[in-house]
Amino acid sequence: MEVLTSLAHGFAVALEPGNLLWCFVGVFLGTIVGVLPGLGPPATIAMLLPLTFHMNPAGAIIMLAGIYYGAKYGGSTTSILLNVPGESASVVTCIDGYQMARNGRAGAALGIAAIASFVAGTVGVVGLMLIAPPVARFALSFSSPEYFALMSLGLALVVLLAGRSLVKALLAALVGLWISSIGTDLFSATSRFVFGTMDLLSGIDFIVVAIGLFAIGEVLANMETREEAQMIAVPKGLRNLLPTWQDLKDCRFAFLNGSIVGFFVGVLPGGGSTIASFLSYGLEKAVSRRREQFGKGVVEGVAAPEGANNSETGGALVPLLTLGIPGSGTTAILLAALVLWGFKPGPLFIPENPDLFWGLVASMYIGNVMLLVLNLPLVPLFAQVLRLPPYVMYPIILGVSVVGVYSESGSLFGLALLAGFGLLGYLMRKIDYPSAPLILGLALGGGMERALRQSLMMSEGNLSILVSRPISAAILSLAGLVLLIPLFNKVNAWRLQALEQE
Amino acid sequence: MRMQTRILALAAIAALAPAALAQGFVPTRPVEVVVHTGPGGGNDVLARAIAVIAEKEHLLPVRMQVVNRPGGNGNLSMAYVAEKRGDPNTIGLFTANMLTVYLVSPEAKVTVRDLTPIARLVLEPAVIAVKADAPYKTLADFIEAAKKNPGQLKQSGGSITSRDNVVRQLLQKATGTRWAYISFPGGGERIAALLGGHVDLMVIEPEEAGEHIRAGSMRVLAQVSEHRLPGYPNVPTLKEAGFDVPAVPQIRGVVAPPGIPKENIAYWEDFFRRLTLTVSWKKYLQDNQFEDGYQNSAELAKFFDSFTGQLRDILKEAGVKTVR
Amino acid sequence: MEEKKLNRGDFWSGLALAALGIYIILEARQWDYLGPEGPGPGFFPMWYGVAMVALSAYLAITSALGKSGGDGAAIDWARVRRALATWLSFAVSVALFKVVGFVASFALLTFFIVAVMYRRPVRVAALTAVLSAAGFYLVFTLALGVALPTGPLGF
C-alpha cells in the first residue's frame, strides 16, 4: 500500500502544470524523433541537455524520458509505411508491418503498433514501479552463461523465420554472424575481416545493414516494373484505417508477450530493444496457430515486437534508477544528465529522491496516454503517405535511407555500405533468401560470441558452466526445443499423411 | 546571393585573409570540436562541458560545436581532423586509448600522432573495487589470494588494450601473480558482473563507484592515482599500499589538424591554458574527480612519445601484437 | 518423366557462399583458435565458416541434382536490368554526395528515376526532383539541423 501512496504523491508532482507541459513536449518530440530516421533519442537528448540546466530536475527528467519512450512509438511509422526502420528497435516491425501495408492494412498496422506500445509501455512502467528492486537483483544474477543461452534462444528462432528453405535461412543467419564479427575483437585487439580499412575497425553498424537490406532492397525490387498496379491500396473509410476488434482479439497474447519479454530483456544490462523485439516476435510466431502466415502480414507480428520495444524502456530504467547502471545508449545519456543536475544514480537514488522517481513514474503513465492520443488520430494521416505515386515515393525512400545512415555515422563509407547492402537485399529477394535471419544473426552474433568467451573465461575453459547454472540450462533447453520445432512439424505432417492414406 | 556577388565576396575575403592572419588568429566561424564517441560518450561530454565553460567565461568570440565522428576505434575522428589540414577552426579531442590503437592496428592509417598536439587537459584516476562482502580488505589481501590461486580470480574491464588491463598488467608484473581478465563492452555490464559476484575485482572510475560505496555494495581497496582523491581520503594509493607501479590515468586532451600556422597553434594553446585557470573548469574537475593534467603543446608532443614507448612495452607483455 | 531442373539461383549462390565460407576459414586460421584464457578470435569464425561451407555445398549439390524444389523459372533479364540500373544510379548519386552535395545529387537521382525509369514527362520529373530535394533540405538541414553531405555551394 506504500506503493500507492508514493504513486499518488508522484501524480501530484507529475500533474503540476509545468511538468505536464514538459511531459507533452517530451513525448511529442520523441514521436517526431522516432518517425524520422536520422534522428535518434541519444542525439536529441544530448542536444537538449544545455536547455535543461534552467529547468527543475523533475520536469527535465520527465521531458527527456518522454523523448526516450516516445521515440519507440514513432519508430514503427516508417517501418510500416516504407520498410525503412526508424531505429534499430523497429527493424522487426518491418517484417510484418510493411506486408500489412502492402495488403492495404497500413492503418491497422499503425494502429495496432500504437495500441501495443501503449499496453506494453504501461506494463513496463508498472513493472518499474512495483518490482524494480527485486528484479534488479535478479538481473545481477544473470551473467555471461545466461546471456549466451538467451542469444542462443534468439538464434534458434531462425528456424521459425525460415519460410520455405531452412538451408537458405541458416545460410543467411551465418552470413549475419560473419558480418557481426567484422571489426576489432574486444578480447585480443585483433582486427577481423576488415579488409585493411580503418573504416571497418569498429564493425558495420546494424542500422546500415537493416536499412540497406529492407528499404533499398525493396525499392530495387519494385523498380523491376513500371506498372501503376505497384501503388499500394489505401482503403477508404475510417473503419478500415484502424485495427478491428478481431485484430485486437488476435493480439491478446502478443500484448502479454511483448510486455513481459520486453521488460525483462530491458532490465538486463546487456539486453536491448532489438533483442527484445526479436525474442518477442519469435515467441509469438512459435505459439501462434497461424505461424506460416508470419512474414506475410499478421497483426500479432507487429504487436509483439512493438510492445516489446516499448516495455523495454521501462525495463531499461530499472538498472539505471535502482543501481545507477546504464544498459543502453539512451540510458547512458540519461545517467549523464542526472549526474549533470547533481544527482547520483545508485542504489540510494530512489529512497533519497522519492519525488523525482515517483514523479517520473507517474509521468510515464501520463505520457503513454498522451502518446496513444497523439498517435492514433495520426494513423489515417500517415496512411495517406501511401497515396503518393511510386515514382515520388521510391526516391524519397532512398533519400530517407541516406539521411538515416549518414546522420548516425557521418561517413560516406557508411553510405557506400548502404548501397552495397541494398544490392545484396535485392539479390537475396531474387534468389529467395530470407533477410530476417541475416538481420537476426547480425544482431545477436556479437553478443553471443562475447558471452561464450566470457563464460569460458569465467569457468577457465569448462563448458559445463553453461548447463550447471539453472537459468542458463533452462534457457538453453528452451532453445533446444525451438530447434526441434521443424522436426515436430515434419513428424506431424507424416502422421497426417499416414492417417489420410488409411 | 547571385553568383557574381558570391565570387566578389569570396575574392574580398581571400584578399583580407592574410591581413587577418598577420594580426594573430581569431576565430570568426563556429569552432568544430571533433569527438570519437556518440552523444553521451566520454569525450562528447567533455567537449560539451568545454563549450559551456568557454561561453560562461567568455573565452571565445564564437561558439563551439561538437561534431561526433565515431568509428574506426577512434581513428575516424582523427582522420576527419586530418582531412581538415590547415583549417584553423577545427580541433579534436583525443584519449590515450588512441595511442594504443596506433600501436596495435595496422589498418589505422591516420592516427593521433599525425595531428598537431595542442594541450593535455585531464587525467582521470581510478579506484580498484571489490564487492562489499568479498574477503579482501586491502589490495594486498587480493594479491595474496591471487598468489594462492593463480589464474582463478577474475577482473572485469574493457578491451584488452584499455587502462583497466594496463593496471592489471603492471600489478601482475610487480607482484608476480596472475588473474584472469574478462572484457565487457559496456561499463554497466562490468559493474553488474562485479555486483553479481561473477568477477572478483574491477578498476572503476571514482565517480561511478561513489554511489555503490555509499550504498554499501562495493568496497574500494586502493586508488590508481598519484595523490589521494578528495572523495577517498581513507583509501591508500597504489604506492602507499606498497605497490611500486605507476598510477596509469585515462588521459584526454586536444589536437588540431596538421599544417596549421604558428599563430593558430599559439591561439589554441592560450585558449586552453586560460580555460584550465578558470573557476568553472576547476569546479568541473572537482565534481568529476578528475585531475588537472595540463600540458602545453610542446610538452604534449614529448608525452606522446614517452607514453607510446611505455605502452608498447606493456602491451608486449600482455601478449598483444604491436605493429608500430 | 520430370526433367531435372537446375535451380540456378540456388546453385550459384551455394557456390558463392561456399567460397565465402572457405575465405572465412582461411582467415580464421591466422588467428588463435584457443587463447590462453579461452576461445580466441579464430574460434567463432571457424565454426560458422565450416557450417557455411557445409550448408552451401549441400545447397549447390541438391540444386544441381534438381532436388531443391525451386521452380527453375527463366530469369526475366529485362526486369533485372531495370532494377540494376536503378541501383547503379543510386550508387552514382552516393558517389556524387561529396562532389555536389546531398541536395543536388538527390535531385539528380529523383529526376533520373522519374524521367528514365518511370518515363514521366521531363516537366514532371524536374518538378518532382526539385520539390523532393527542397523538402529534404527544409526538413532535415534547416528544421532539424541534421547534417547532410554538402557540396561546394554549401548544401
Image (cartoon, rainbow, N blue to C red):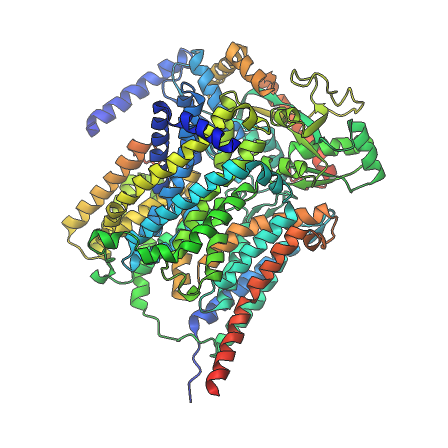
Residue C101 image point, x, y percent: 32, 38
The C terminus of chain B lies in quadrant: top right
Choose between A399 and B285: the one closer to the eye.
B285
| The quarter of the displayed image where residue B121 is located | top right
Placement of A396 over or under B258, stated as above or below: below
- How many numbered marks are there? 0
Q: Which residue lies furthest to the right in this view?
A: B148
Residue A138 image point, x, y percent: 61, 42
Residue C140 image point, x, y percent: 31, 36
Choose between C115 and A300: the one closer to the eye.
A300
Residue A15 visible, this orientation: yes
The N terminus of chain B lies in quadrant: top left
Relative placement, left or right, of A223 versus B5 is right
Relative placement, left or right, of A440 versus B234 is left
Choose between C9 and A116: the one closer to the eye.
A116
Residue C113 visible, this orientation: no
Please report the residue visible at 73 percent of the width from the left and 37 percent of the height from the top.
B200
Please report the residue visible at 38 percent of the width from the left and 22 percent of the height from the top.
B30
Q: Which residue lies furthest to the bottom in this view?
A: C1
Please report the residue visible at 37 percent of the width from the left and 62 percent of the height from the top.
A296
Q: Residue furthest front?
A: A1
Residue C152 image point, x, y percent: 31, 34
Placement of B295 over or under A331, stated as above or below: above
| The quarter of the displayed image where residue A48 is located | top left
Placement of B253 over or under C12, stated as above or below: above
Relative placement, left or right, of B217 versus B28 is right
